[in-house]
Amino acid sequence: MSNKNVGIKDVAFAAGVSVTTVSHVLNDVSYARISPETRDKVKSVAEQLGYGPNRLAQALRTQRTGMLGLVSEDIATTPHAGRIILGADEAARARGYNLMIINTSGNASPESREADVEALLERRVDGILYATMYHRHIQVPSNLGGVPAVLVDAVSTGGSVTAVVPDEEGGARAAVGCLLAAGHTRIGFLNNTDDVPATRDRLRGFRATLTEAGLDGGAAPVESEPSEVQGGYEAARRILARPGRPTGLFCYNDRMAMGAYRAAAELGLSIPGDLSVVGFDDQELIAANLHPGLTTVALPHYEMGAWATQNLIDAIEGKADLGLMALRPTVLDCPVVVRDSVAAPPL
Amino acid sequence: MSNKNVGIKDVAFAAGVSVTTVSHVLNDVSYARISPETRDKVKSVAEQLGYGPNRLAQALRTQRTGMLGLVSEDIATTPHAGRIILGADEAARARGYNLMIINTSGNASPESREADVEALLERRVDGILYATMYHRHIQVPSNLGGVPAVLVDAVSTGGSVTAVVPDEEGGARAAVGCLLAAGHTRIGFLNNTDDVPATRDRLRGFRATLTEAGLDGGAAPVESEPSEVQGGYEAARRILARPGRPTGLFCYNDRMAMGAYRAAAELGLSIPGDLSVVGFDDQELIAANLHPGLTTVALPHYEMGAWATQNLIDAIEGKADLGLMALRPTVLDCPVVVRDSVAAPPL
DNA sequence: CTGAAAGCGCTAACAA
DNA sequence: TTGTTAGCGCTTTCAG
């Protein structure tokens, strides 16, 4: 247990050596030539006294805090933020860094965002992670350039900051591929109405995959609604009322899929017997708990947090050049999580 | 935008005054007598140069970092942690503090927990918040005593650390009260099987409320299963098969309630027409998205995070005595969130 | 009304 | 092989 009151000089005194010596042995300074006896002596004395370094003083002196700032949009409202934080925290601690977290609202003013970054800068964090709640384009705070920074789940409108985002199109391709593999040929898409990258990219992936499979992707049925349960329900009702009703449904997210489940139940369609459904997001609370379990596409939040952190630290330590990486966002895989909502189409 | 390269002495030089003067005006030191002109001069020069204080240096000198450590169990797995963090973050920033977050696993070893606290101590946080993922008793790390600390959603086995927890029994009372108010007299409880405070306290609240309403609380039907959807389903099947089938169900949590919904559907029982259901936890993803919306009891995670932070800061600033508060845990209200799953019992 | 100087705990030249 | 010392950027006592 580190005793806040004992410093390096107390150890030095107790061990009968100078502070330099103590500093050298405790930090394993390579060029220091110190006898093994002195080393042991110092170490044991430090241990006995319960010495713990004062990281503030170290940081002041070395100009390195070993702290990363994480500004995260809407930590509480989605479980996604938690996974980003977890990925970042684990990657950070693996390299000896810690995380300072600042929460910001998704609709905070530019000034307030700058103030958040400013707070981090005043504490001299070595780098900053800037995470958004869902994949989107953002105008980064102007003072973000003060230290190395990487965006998580967002790309900057200027395109000048290193960023890591999910492979939306790839995820959609995987989802549709799943349905195709099960033998479906009449596949519909329940899309979101928001103008965000996911909406466009998943649609593109949907159509392209069908076309590549020899189906008419351009003509495949798509219904759009707000990406909530209710929207999913309504879009599903519409799409299932079409002539040549789809036997497979790809949903923009798990909530819409949940709405599709209800629509199917009302229409007397069993899942997956009469209708196969694939979601997106892998919100476990929903996907794992629906009946039957929802096959869905996972967003790589943990991985994005970890990737961003590793590369941020590499940049801080001079092992990587963020400038180069900023050229285009890094895109991470969205793997399919197979549960029980996909089967062969009815005969 | 704060420029990392300009310090107090640059401001002093540019303004033609001493560093003392700069420090005094920038910190509004009460006893400093400085002419308004000098004040303005200093402020404008500081502004122009983009001066921002180096909080590390300040902290080293004042022995106050303005940082709070938050060690949180399983940040990612539940949305609950997010709400605690949010409550803590908002309370902290309102008082000029920031949060350092360390994630720990629910089943981490005592040593690893101590190491987490140690990391915070080395960074000289002014106080520590220790949050668990669900309400329980814990053995606090032995080095937690190094600074003021408060437990969130947990109480220490020794009972010596200030703690804030949800009012489990009160929440159960409110839930049952809700059912009683709708006219139900045959009310059942789907309980958890884990040996945790919530299991016992909710059961006690359940029975007591019935008894106080003139019903036989001791004989009221209770079925226990693991607190997941599947457990809820099974417990519901059993309880609904009993003679004198309950018309109202109080469920240990929202996931079990979700299982009860499925059981009801299978039995052809409509909610809330034939069966009223009340959950616990208010996991929005579930409660708000079930059909009909689930009336449930909210856990005060945000409030616990905020309460803990406010009192921690009070203690740090000498405005409160945590020792006194440690005598018994502070208990926060669990309010009912009314949705659409409760109605009068069938005739 | 303002300034000089000590010192928070540590690291790293440099000296011995 | 080890010690002396300057200084990281700031606050604060004490002296003008």
Image (tube, coloured by chain):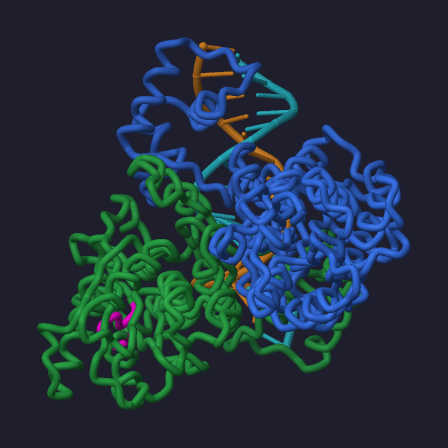
Chain colours: A green, B blue, C orange, D cyan
Q: Is residue A169 found inside the magenta-colored segment of the image?
A: yes
State the image quarter where residue A136 is shown. Answer: bottom left
Residue at (40% x, 64% y) in the render: A266
Q: State the image coordinates of residue A305 (x, y, percent, origin top left).
A: 41, 66
Q: Of B33 and A235, which appears nearest the observer?
A: A235
The magenta-colored residue range is A166-171
State the image quarter where residue B223 is shown. Answer: bottom right
Describe residue B211's horizontal placement relative to residue A9 as left or right.
right
State the residue lying farthest toward the front: B347
| Residue B126 appears in the figure | no
Q: State the image coordinates of residue A225 (x, y, percent, origin top left).
A: 26, 55
Describe residue A277's horizontal placement relative to residue B259 as left or right.
left
Q: State the image coordinates of residue B218 (x, y, percent, origin top left).
A: 90, 54
State the image quarter where residue A340 is shown. Answer: bottom left
Residue at (48% x, 65% y) in the render: A286
Q: Of A287 and B241, which appears nearest the observer?
A: B241
As drawn, A304 above or below B36: below
| Residue A308 appears in the figure | yes
Q: Is residue B38 found inside the magenta-colored segment of the image?
A: no
